[in-house]
Image (cartoon, helix red, strand yellow):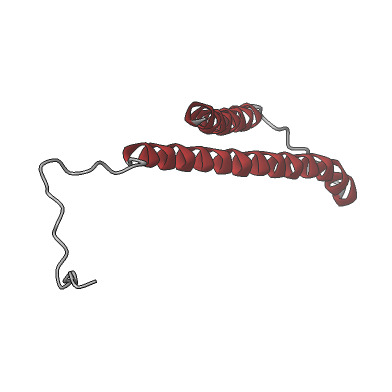
Amino acid sequence: MKDQTMMIAYATLFAGIALLAFTFISAYSYLATNPAITGSSDLVNAFGSSLAPLIEAAIRIMYLGVMGWIGSGLTVRGVQLITKLKQLDKIPLVPKAPTGVKPLAPTGVKENKDD
């Protein structure tokens, strides 16, 4: 049971790291492209032709932000699971009885031999 839980914890951690890596690679590839800035003497045409790339950039930024947020959350949960499971492995389920210690005799209790 512990092995399965540890495997799930590591899978969560690696899924988060993979998602973060993919997010950073996607962001880098997006920023590596050189966006073309359109210019025009007509303000309405310039605004209309530049609005579509701005909306596309905003959608990509939101997409990358959500992916980064989810990847970060998965990574944090994976690390928390692994550290908690490692702490639980150090705690013994049944404490060991000390060796060489004799039980104490009951004090304050006198047996009544008249009964």
Name the side, left or right, on which 21 lies relative to 82. Answer: right
Q: Quadrant of the C terminus?
A: bottom left
Residue 83: image location, x then y, percent: 40, 40
Q: Can you tell which quarter of the image residue 27 is in?
A: top right
Work out which residue is located at the far front of the displayed protein and give it.
Answer: 114
Task: Using the rendered image of the protein, determine whether residue 40 is visible from the camera's viewpoint.
Answer: no
Task: Using the rendered image of the protein, determine whether residue 104 is visible from the camera's viewpoint.
Answer: yes
Q: Residue at x 73, y 37 (%)?
A: 37
Q: Can you tell which quarter of the image residue 73 is in?
A: top right
Residue 95: image location, x then y, percent: 29, 44
Q: Residue at x 84, y 48 (%)?
A: 47
Q: Nearer the viewer, residue 111 or 100?
A: 111
Q: Nearer the viewer, residue 52 or 16?
A: 16
Q: How many marks?
A: 0
Name the side, left or right, on which 34 lies relative to 12. Answer: right
Residue 33: image location, x then y, percent: 66, 27
